Amino acid sequence: GDSVTQMEGPVTLSEEAFLTINCTYTATGYPSLFWYVQYPGEGLQLLLKATKADDKGSNKGFEATYRKETTSFHLEKGSVQVSDSAVYFCALRPNSGYSTLTFGKGTMLLVSP
Amino acid sequence: NAGVTQTPKFQVLKTGQSMTLQCAQDMNHEYMSWYRQDPGMGLRLIHYSVGAGITDQGEVPNGYNVSRSTTEDFPLRLLSAAPSQTSVYFCASTHGQGVDYGYTFGSGTRLTVV
């Protein structure tokens, strides 16, 4: 079945550091890929998405590129802020009919001033 | 536009009690689903619905029932609560087959079973 693997956290960074959170997936065909963010005490919010190979999703300074050859969708940000502290989830959704989201286990990011 | 509304936000149950977690969306989304979030486990799909009158099981359906009598509402019922059902529950909705659409999540219900 489909699966998503994320790097384990927590990831601890100082403000203005470069962020990478690794995500790889296993799926049949070519799914759509998503990053969701969950701030403390809140639900999940869509951060960015990519629906086909080589697409780059971007939002709020975060970027991720759909790499079919390495089945990866790594999340990056050039300069993190304290307000970016949250849990980040990588997810996939098959591109066929009605389909559910499959999530990774989440990566907690802690940014200190 | 309220999005996805979940009630209650917090609930404590005794083992064996029953309750219903409510979920309502006002975006005319066809697709609704329930997830539970547990530490180190990510989000796991409990049940989902592709439209009024149609439901199906997800990865962890045991101990939960759902129904979908309207497009807007998708309640989750715990028939006899167990401590293993202590978790944070999220309802989510999206348009049907359009994969360009992300999911909209509710703010969650934190359930403790003692």
Image (cartoon, coloured by chain):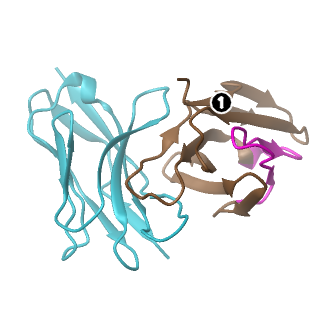
Chain colours: A cyan, B brown
Image position of B36 (left or right of B97):
right
Depicted A14 relative to depicted A100: above or below = above
Decide if residue B114 is in sight here: no
What x and y, as percent, mark residue A46? 38, 41
Name the outermost residue toward the bottom: A28
Name the outermost residue toward the top: A113
Q: Secondary structure at mark 1?
A: strand
Q: How many marks?
A: 1
Check disc 1 and give the amino acid type. Answer: Gln
* Residue identified by numbered label 1: B6
What x and y, as percent, mark residue A108? 34, 40
Q: Nearer the viewer, residue A8 or A69?
A: A69
The residue sitting at 56% across, 24% down in the picture is: B2
The residue sitting at 89% across, 46% down in the picture is: B80
The residue sitting at 56% across, 45% down in the picture is: B93
Q: Which residues are magenta?
A: B61-84
Depicted A30 relative to depicted A81: above or below = below
Q: Chain of mark 1?
A: B
The residue sitting at 53% across, 64% down in the picture is: A99
Please tell me whether residue B62 belongs to the stretch shown in magenta: yes
Q: Main secondary structure of the magenta part?
A: loop
Q: Quadrant of the C terminus of chain A?
A: top left
Q: Quadrant of residue A3?
A: bottom left
Please tell me whether residue A97 belongs to the stretch shown in magenta: no
What x and y, as percent, mark residue A9? 32, 47
Q: Residues within 10 Å of mark 1 (few under 14, many from 20)?
A: many
Q: Nearer the viewer, residue A21 or A110?
A: A21
What x and y, as percent, mark residue B46? 67, 55
